[in-house]
Image (cartoon, rainbow, N blue to C red):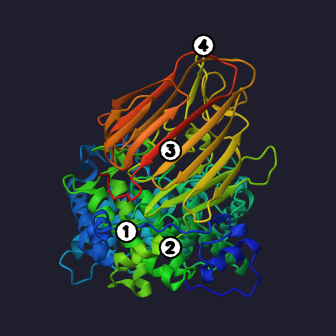
Amino acid sequence: MQARRTRLALSALAAAALAAACGGGSGGDMGSSGTAASSGAVSSSKTVLPEVFALEPKLSREPMNDIMTGELLPIIDRLFDLVRAQGLDTELQGVKVFAPNSGDKFLPGKVAIGFSYLLLNSSLSDPKYQTYLDGYRAIADMTIDVVNETWGIYYYTSALWKLKKAGHLDGPTPAVNPATLELLKTKLDWRIFVDQANNYALKNGLPTNYYGVAFSIARLRYLLGWEDATGSEALLQKMISHYKTFSAYGFSDETDGSGRFDRYSILLIGEIWQRLIETDMQVSAEDEALLKGWLRQSVDVIKLRLNPAGNGVDYGRSLSAYADTAFCELLSAAEHMNVLTDEEKEVAYAFATRVAAKYVEFWYDSDWGSLNMWEKGRRTDSYRGKARILGENLSLSHQLLYTNNLWKASGFAQKKPMATPQFVQYLQALPSSTLTKFAGFDGQGATYDRGLVTYRDGLRVISLPVVNGAATYHRTNPYFAIPHSYNMLSGVADTQWPQLQPRFTFANTGTPQVLIPASYQKNLQTQASADGRQLQVTWQQDALDRVAGTGSGSQPFKDTRITSSTRFDFEPGQITRVDTYTPTGTQAISKVELEFGSFSSDVTALGGNRFSYASGDVTGFEIEGLQDCTVADVSADTNYNTPGGALKTSIRCSSPAFSFEQPLTIKWVLKYRPDSIASFKPN
């Protein structure tokens, strides 16, 4: 779909965001866009390019399309041969992928989209063309009764539309048998998970990004001739309405106002634009202006997080390889819709190539013959468990292939990415610190602030998310308001151990009540030094989150027995956090705990709760306000396996039972190599 210039006045939100694309960049105060940047830019006193070359994927210097044809399509080809040979008994790394209890509810759709690329990238003269055609048809027949929901429905309809456009659904030997296609017409329907009669409400508590899934299915069904345009038009407006209602600064709240802003919040607008591009859907000038404005804002967040290694989002759920490919989806859509400057397009392509290279050099395990997000120190969310191994191989390959197709369409097919020295020079000129506002910031007593602080120390990117994990995730440490940075500071999917923030356990009868400083942050403020190298971040909490005991549950529980104030100080090579916790009355506490799980190792206790590390990017950790600290080797404990690899050590600090009557201050200082650069894999 060609970008169209609108003659209508843009909203203030869209105008501010689009101004950045026209030369405003992401420096300075972005006003209504929600991102404020410091005046200075970090420039490392010395950039050691040999180190950068060592830490970036080797293939990142090659054209992205060469990685697709030389590396990724052969991987899909091998998986195709496996499924064709073993059928519904297909086994990959010990997983019976089509078993009824496999837990992969999207698999037929991912198989359809993944294997479609073999047909779409081969000609009639290709020796394997007939094998692909016959095999695709047989696999479609074979999987017709395998469970396929939501995302799987979208992937399947997308595959069918691509095949139809290429002529593979026509003729005497189509890629899908007519009888199977007729069954798919009924099975591939967005109304299975959307209540059309109830104002298009999502069923079963699905998060709001599923509006995008439903819209995509409806639009593809329309193009396939299976329904009229009513559903897709209504669902598009439903998505836009959600943005307007719950996303004051243009980022999608995954909930209806609770404040969960994560990878999906930044990605969703990219997915919307990708579906508009895929289906060539024209929208009104007013909607286009809003959608482009929101797309530009997500680009500005991503732009601040670019790095030499191809690493993506570093906090929240559903990370692993999807953390990286999210950037590819957004940046390719932004390039196609012309909301990037010429320089930004070159930078975006260079980063997308790094993501593709990282996938085949790190996420793909040649010993397995498969993607690996689950073992050898890696861990992801339970709903992306190893039972989904085949589907995850194919959906991630799809994301890389279809975004590469957009770059090819823009003339990048045989183009090598920007050279590393120029790419690094661009990164070093980015703002040193930013506050991206997601929600709140209105000064009202009942409002909580949601935002993302980004601090760049040379080429290292450090995130400080101040959000609400909301239902299910509020008590898990990937959503804690703590620093996150690739291969240095990380949470662990689905775990609740107290990474870098305290956990208060009350001495009550029955199930002990446990409080953590989460969910209720307000008055979030940042202050940077004139040169941008020092950053202070502060907020207060009028309550803590009760995560265990009476009243706790899936949703956050506001407990006012403890309030708190927090201050972070960032400077090159050091992060300091100071919390003051104030009790309401006198509270009986049985223990207070805090941990620091680290990729660094060879720890030496220096006395006084001070520790040094001989190996890794972290060099020191010290803490005040808690009595006892010990060091544990956690390298073999799966509860310390991050998306990218295993943490090695944990410093575990605690205080025994006490009567909590006066304010308690807990302070920690974390030191790291100021010239450290995150690799595409743990050191």
Q: Is label 4 or label 3 in front? A: 3
Distance in Å between CA atoms under marks 2 and 3: 29 Å
Residue 3 position, x and y percent, is: 59, 85
Residue highlighted by disc 2: 429
Instruction: Tell me the amino acid under the disc marked 2.
Output: Ala
Q: Secondary structure at mark 2?
A: loop
Q: Disc number at residue 510?
A: 4
Contact check, label 4 and label 1, Cβ < 8 Å: no
Q: Is label 1 or label 2 in front? A: 1
Determine if residue 616 is in view: yes
Q: Residue at x 31, y 57 (%)?
A: 363
Who comes first in sequence, dot 4 or dot 3? 3
Q: Is label 2 or label 4 in front? A: 2
Counting other residues with Cα less than 10 Å from the Cα at mark 2, is it few (<14), some (14-19), or many (20 or more)? some
Who comes first in sequence, dot 1 or dot 3? 1
Distance in Å between CA atoms under marks 1 and 2: 13 Å
Instruction: Tell me the amino acid under the disc marked 3.
Output: Pro
Q: Residue at x 36, y 79 (%)?
A: 417
Distance in Å between CA atoms under marks 4 and 3: 29 Å
Who comes first in sequence, dot 4 or dot 1? 1
Contact check, label 1 and label 2, Cβ < 8 Å: no
Distance in Å between CA atoms under marks 4 and 1: 57 Å
Residue highlighted by disc 3: 478
The single residue placed furthest to the top in the displayed view is 509
Q: Is label 4 or label 1 in front? A: 1
Q: Disc number at residue 47?
A: 1
Residue 565 position, x and y percent, is: 68, 39
Is residue 559 depicted above or below 526 in this figure? above
Determine if residue 476 is in view: no
